[in-house]
Amino acid sequence: MESPILQGLNPAQRAAVEAYDSASLIIAGAGSGKTRVLTSRIAYMIQKGIKPKNILATTFTNKAAQEMRERIVKMIPEHLTEGQARHIWMGTFHSIFARILRTDAERIGFPANFTIYDASDAKNLIKTIVKELNLADDKYKPNTIASRISQAKNALVTPGAYLANSAHATEDRRAQIPEFGNIYNLYCQRCKHNGAMDFDDLLLQTNILLRDCPDVLERYQEQFKYILVDEYQDTNYAQYIIVRRLSQHHGKVCVVGDDAQSIYSFRGAKIENILSFQRDYPEAKVFKLEQNYRSTRTIVEAANSVIVHNSRRMEKRCFSEGDEGEKIRVLKAYTDREEAELVVQDLRDKVRATGDAWNEAAILYRTNNQSQALEESLRRRGIPYRIYKGASFYDRKEIKDMLAYIRLVVNPRDDEAFRRIVNYPARGIGDTTVLRIAQLAAERGVSMWEAVDALVAEPVSDPVQRTIVRKVAEFVALIRSLSLERAQKGLYDFGMEVASRSGILALFRRENSPEATSALDNIEELLNSMQLFKEQRDAEIRGGEELGEATVEEWLQSVTLTTDMDKKEDAGDDDKVTLMTVHSAKGLEFKYVYIVGMEENLFPSQRAAESPEGFEEERRLFYVALTRAKCSAVLSYAEMRFKWGNMEFSRPSCFLREIDPRYLDGAVGAGQTPVREEAAAGGRTALEELRRRFDVRYQQRAGGSGNPSFGGAKSSFGGRGGAYSGGSRPESGAPSFGGQGGTDSAFRRPALQRPVVPENLRRLGGGAAPAAGNAAASGYAVGERVEHPKFGCGEIVRIETLAADHKLVVVFEEYGEKTLLAKFAKLTKR
DNA sequence: TATGATATCCTTTTT
DNA sequence: GGATATCATA
C-alpha cells in the first residue's frame, strides 16, 4: 500500500520525495510546495526506517526548522513522537554547528563554554584593535573592517592564509587599509584568547575542526547519513565545504532552492553553489517544481516576465493554474509620506471590502528606514501592524548589559563583556583604569578578568591605587557571587540575581521615566524567556528525554542565535498588517502584498546596481517580493523622498517597466502627463509644476486647511527649522518649493532646491524662473582643482545638486575620494 | 565623571 | 533627518 505521505503530491513533488536515497537537486520555484516536499521527504525517510539522528537538515531560520519539525511529526505520528523528532539535526547552519563545536571546541583551541560574539561585540573588538595599533579610525572603519573579516572567513581564508597572499595585500593598499591583514590576525587571536567565536567563526571553525580532526570528521560523516539543505541558493562557501566534507563518502545530499531567489550575496552567499550542484554531485537527480500553488496567474506571469531579464538562470518555467486574478496596480505619489498614505488607504479599503483579516496584508520595502512613514500612516488610521526588524530586542542596551553579566559569569575570559559592565552601573572604574587593566592583561597574557582577579589579591602601597583596587575588588566579588548563584539556582532565579545584584534593576527603578519603565519591561521579558526555556526543557525531560536541566550556557546560546524573526507570533494577538523588508519576507506569503519605494536608486539600490551581478540580485529580490503575493500585488513609488535629510527626486524603478504590461492595470505612470512636459506646456519650471500639482491636490483633499499630506505641520522641505526664518510662514498653507527653480536638468539629476525664504516666493509667483538649479549654481565645476584645509589638494570629479546644497565628489591626492557639501566644505580654488 | 553639545556616519539587505 | 560617537565643560 502506498504511503499516505505521497498522496496529494504532484508527479514532480512525489518523485523528489521518493528519491530520498540519492543525491538530489530540487529546484523549487516560488510557491511550488517546497517545504511540503522537504518535510515529506524527511517523513518518508523516517517511515522507511531511517533514524532521525542520522538526518541533518539545515534551514535558513530557526523558525523554519521549528515549523518543519512540527509538520513532520504531524505527518507520521505513528512513527515519530515529538521527542523523537528532536533527534533530527534540524536548524540553521549556525545553530547546528555551534552545538557541534560545543562538544569538540577544545580540539581546536577553544573552550567548550566559548562565547558567541554578535556583530556589535565584533565591532567593538575591532575598534579596540584599531586604537591599539594607532591607526586612523577614519580609514579603518569598524563596519568596513568587520565586513572584510566576514568575507574572508566565509571564504575560509584564515589570517595566516590572508597574510601569505600578496594579492590581498595589494588590494588592501589600494583600499587604503594596508594594515587590514594585521587587524584580521589580531582579531582572531583576541577572539581565541577570549574564548569567543563570532557568527562566521561558527562556520569557519567547524571547517577547521573537520579539516584537522579526522576522527571528528569521521564521526559526523557516520552520523549524518543523509543531509538536506534548504535555501541552497543562499549558502556560502564555508557552508558549501561543510556539506562537501560531511557527505564525502555517502554523497546523499539533497539540496532545495531556487536560483531566482538568491538574495544574500552581501553576506557571502554564492549562487554558484546551486548553479553548479550537478557538477559537484554528478550522480544527483534533478527535480523541478514548477507549478505555483500560491499565486494568481497574473502574479506568476508578471514575476516571470521580470526574471527573464536575468542572464544567469537555471532553466525552468513557473506556472499557475489558479485564477487569473487582478492586475498589478502601480500607485504613484509625490512624496514618501504621500506614498505611505496612498498605500495604507488602499490596503484598508482592500481589507474592508474583502472582509479579510489585517494579517492577510503585508507591506514590503527595500530598506528598513522606509517603515517610518508607513508606520505613521498606519498609526494615524488605527490599523494594527507588526514590524519586523532584525534583532531589535537583543539590541537594546539594557538587554545587552544583562547579557554581558551573564556572559562574563559563563566565560570570564570574555573581555568584551568585561569592558561593557566593569563600570556599569557606574562604580567609579574610569576609562583610565580600564585601559590599565587591559594593559596589565596584555602584559601578563591573560584576560582582563584574570588580570583583575589576580590584582586584588596583590598588596598595594599607593593609597590612590588602593581606592581603585578596592572598587575593582568589589566588582570581582560581585561576579564571584553571581557565579555561585549560577551553580545553586535555577535559570530564572539566577537571572533575577543578576538583575538585582548588578544594580541594573535599582538603576531603572530609581528613575521614573518612560524609558526606565520600558527597560524594566524588557528585562522582565528576558527573565521570562529564561523561565520559558527551563519549562520547555522540563517538559522534554518529562517526555522521557535523557537531558539535563536547562543550563545558562544553553540559554545564552539560544539567545544569541535567535532573532526576533524566529519568535512565534503571540497567539490571538496576530491580526496585524506585516511590515518588513523584502529580505525578511523570503519564504512567507500574504494575500495582499504592497511593495513600496519602487524607485531607481532605492529598488534597485544604488550600490547594488553598480555591478551587473548586484543588479541581477536586485531583480531577484524584486522577484521574491512579487511572488509573496497570493491574490494581489500593488506597487508604489514616490517622485520625491527624504534622503539624508534632503528631499530628493526619484524616478520610477526600471523594474516597473520590465513587468509585461499585460499584467499591469494601466501603464506605468499613466493617467498623468510627465511633469516635465506639462511644465513646458504651461511655461513653468518643473519644480513649479510639481508645486502647482501639489497645491491642487492639497486643496482638493484638505479643503485648503489642515495639514497637507506631504510635509505635515512641519514642512518637509524646510528641513531645518530656519527655513522660514526672517518672515512669517506663507499664508497659502502649502509648503513652498524652493525659490530657485531648476531647469529640467534638475529632474535628470534628482535634486530639489532648498526652500523658501519669503522674498523668493514672490519670484515663484511671478513665473519668471530664475535659472540654474544645476551644478553650475554650486560655484564649482567638474574638473576644477580645489584645496581643503584637511584633505589638501584635489580635483572635483562630480557635482550633484541637492535640495539645499551641492554635493561635491572630490578626489584628493592624499586622501582619495571624498564627498563634501559645497556649503560646508571650506574649499579654496587653486 | 556625568552631562550636554557637537561631529559623523548613515542607508541595502541578516545568521 | 536621526542615531550614535566623541568632545568639551562643569
Image (cartoon, coloured by chain):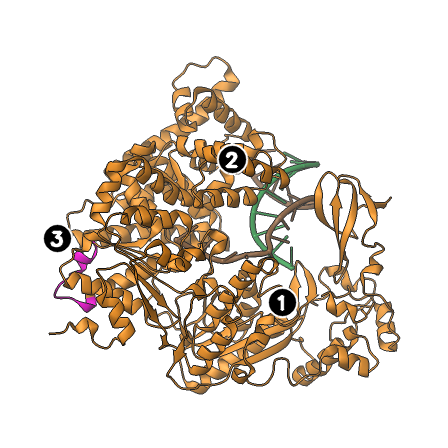
Chain colours: A orange, B brown, C green
Q: Is residue A768 left or right of residue A489?
A: right
User: Where does label 1 land, which residue?
Assistant: A600
Tell me the distance, in whole angstroms, between the alpha carbons under discs 2 and 1.
39 Å
Q: Secondary structure at mark 3?
A: loop
* Label 2 vs label 1, nearer the camera: 2
What is the span of residues highlighted in magenta in the rendered image? Answer: A74-87
> Same subunit under labels 3 and 1?
yes
Q: Secondary structure at mark 1?
A: loop
Residue in front for this viewpoint, A309 or A134: A309
The residue depicted at 44 percent of the width and 26 percent of the height is A472
User: Where does label 2 land, which residue?
Assistant: A165
Q: Give coordinates of residue A584: x percent, y percent.
A: 44, 62
Tell me the distance, in whole angstroms, between the alpha carbons under discs 3 and 2.
53 Å
> Same subunit under labels 3 and 2?
yes
Q: Magenta stretch: residue A684 in it?
A: no
The image quadrant where one finds the N terminus of chain A is: bottom left
Q: Earlier in the sequence, mark 3 or mark 1?
A: 3
Q: Quadrant of residue A757?
A: bottom right
Which amino acid type is marked by label 2? Asn
Name the chain under label 2.
A
Tell me the crowding category of disc 3: few under 14, some 14 to 19, or many 20 or more residues within 10 angstroms, Cα based: few
